Image (cartoon, rainbow, N blue to C red):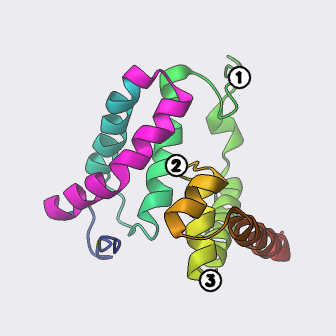
């Protein structure tokens, strides 16, 4: 399925309704699986709704270059707020202050690193990018990806391994 078009740079609010509905249809099932694995499965639909509600309220003037990656970052934030836990499942210490940790310099470094990662991900061959994305973002097993893509499990192992090596090298170039 072709990715829905991205908002225009002049757009400073939520995406148009048709585009928003397309995102819900395309990315909703993956978000639901993401939440079912990390939270109470009965809450998955509520959590997906929270992610799309956050997207609908988005007022950032910058266009979303990678809708899927952005949605899953929002999903991780929703999950963290909901459970008061880190991505590894450990409770967030009461003394932790996100504002103290995110200085302007650190935010800039993070944006640069994310930009390098997205550029590297977009530079991967299409099949490697697809296999890597299905494994890392959709959390599909190698066997499920192999079945989905119509190739062997060893081919998926090679695709994901090469993709990981290229992404790691791209991130280390500037680090």
Name the quarter where the N terminus is drawn: bottom left
Question: Residue 73 shows which numbered tag?
Answer: 2
95 relative to 60, above or below: above
Q: Are marks 1 and 2 in contact (CB under 8 Å)?
A: no
Q: Is residue 74 left or right of residue 139?
A: left
- Give the magenta range: 17-42
Secondary structure beneath label 2: helix
* Magenta stretch: helix, strand or loop mostly: helix
- In percent of width and height, residue 89 lies at 67, 26
Q: Are marks 2 and 3 in contact (CB under 8 Å)?
A: no
Q: Nearer the viewer, residue 77 or 61?
A: 77
- In percent of width and height, residue 75 lies at 47, 41
Q: Are marks 1 and 3 in contact (CB under 8 Å)?
A: no
Residue in the image at 38% along x and 23% along y:
43
Task: First in sequence, mark 2 or 3: give its number.
Answer: 2
100 relative to 148, above or below: above
Q: How many marks?
A: 3
Residue identifier under label 3:
125
How crowded pointer 3 is (Cα within 10 Å; few <14, some 14-19, many 20+) is rated as few
Residue furthest top as drawn: 94
Q: Magenta stretch: residue 11 in it?
A: no
Mark yes or no: residue 18 visible.
Answer: yes
Question: Residue 90 shows which numbered tag?
Answer: 1
Q: Magenta stretch: residue 24 in it?
A: yes
Residue in the image at 59% along x and 72% along y:
129
Residue in the image at 53% along x and 40% along y:
76
Task: First in sequence, mark 1 or 2: give its number.
Answer: 2
Q: Is residue 125 left or right of residue 78?
A: right
The residue mark sitting in front, 2 or 3, is 3
């Amino acid at each position: 399925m072709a990715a829905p078009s991205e908002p225009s740079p002049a757009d400073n609010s939520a995406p148009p309704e048709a585009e928003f509905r397309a995102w819900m249809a395309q990315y909703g099932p993956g978000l639901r699986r993401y939440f079912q694995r990390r939270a109470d499965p009965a809450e998955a639909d509520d959590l997906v709704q929270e992610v799309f509600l956050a997207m609908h309220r988005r007022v950032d003037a910058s266009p979303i270059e990678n809708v899927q990656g952005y949605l899953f970052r929002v999903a991780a934030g929703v999950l963290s707020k909901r459970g008061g836990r880190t991505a590894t499942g450990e409770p967030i210490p009461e003394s932790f202050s996100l504002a103290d940790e995110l200085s302007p310099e650190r935010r800039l470094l993070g944006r640069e690193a994310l930009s390098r990662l997205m550029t590297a991900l977009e530079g991967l061959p299409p099949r490697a990018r697809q296999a890597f994305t299905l494994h890392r973002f959709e959390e599909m097993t190698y066997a499920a990806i192999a079945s989905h893509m119509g190739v062997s499990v060893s081919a998926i192992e090679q695709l994901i391994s090469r993709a990981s090596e290229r992404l790691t090298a791209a991130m280390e170039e500037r680090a």
